[in-house]
Image (tube, rainbow, N blue to C red):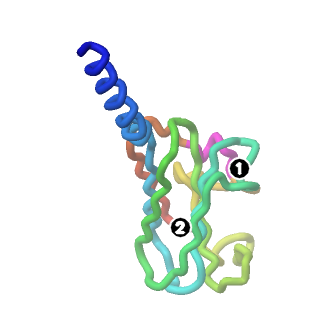
Amino acid sequence: MFLKNHARCLALSLLMLPALALAEQKTIKVHVYGVQPASGTLEISLFNSTENFMKEPYLQESLPVSEEGLVEVEFANLTDGEYAVVVVHDANDNGALDRGFLGIGGEGYGFSNAAMPWFGWPGFEDASFTVEGPETIVEITLD
């Protein structure tokens, strides 16, 4: 009888392992404000290290822009750690971030933590945030 009950407990424990693993997964929800005009593509890039920042995204979503305003994207199945988000609105779909006179104007872009570039792009440490809880919301307004 003891072995039979022990086997049931073991089987039940093994069945619960995937559920426990999923419970530890984290989600980052990115809210992008100021998307305009209603054209082109919005690229939302998630970085997880200084070495890859602005070079090779850990995860990336590319969405066609069909209306102005707020766009929401979710990155799921993440672990605790440091992350940074970069958003670029390629309004004319030419594959480049067009900048206006003296770098002002042109197409919209933004960084997590509202990190602002002065001469070049901000560093990972300026744009990074810590993910610890089950859900982290990042708000970015395009400039």
Residue at 52% x, 84% y: name it: 37
> Which of label 2 and label 1 is nearer to you?
1
Question: Along the line of sight, which residue is nearer the eye, 54 or 25?
Answer: 25
Residue at 51% x, 81% y: name it: 65
Tag 2: amino acid: Leu
Magenta span contains residue 123? yes
Magenta part of the chain: 122-128
Crowd class of label 2 (few under 14; some 14 to 19; many from 20; radius 10 Å)? some
Residue 84 location, x and y as percent? 59, 48
Q: Is residue 142 above or below residue 125?
A: below
Magenta span contains residue 127? yes
Q: Secondary structure at mark 1?
A: loop
Most extreme residue toward the front is 1
Residue 41 location, x and y as percent? 59, 78
Q: Secondary structure at mark 2?
A: loop
Disc 2 designates what residue? 142
Tag 1: amino acid: Phe
Q: Is residue 96 above or below residue 133?
A: below
Residue 56 location, x and y as percent? 73, 55
Location of residue 107 (image quadrant): bottom right
Q: Earlier in the sequence, mark 2 or mark 1?
A: 1
Location of residue 44 (image quadrant): bottom right
Crowd class of label 1 (few under 14; some 14 to 19; many from 20; radius 10 Å)? many
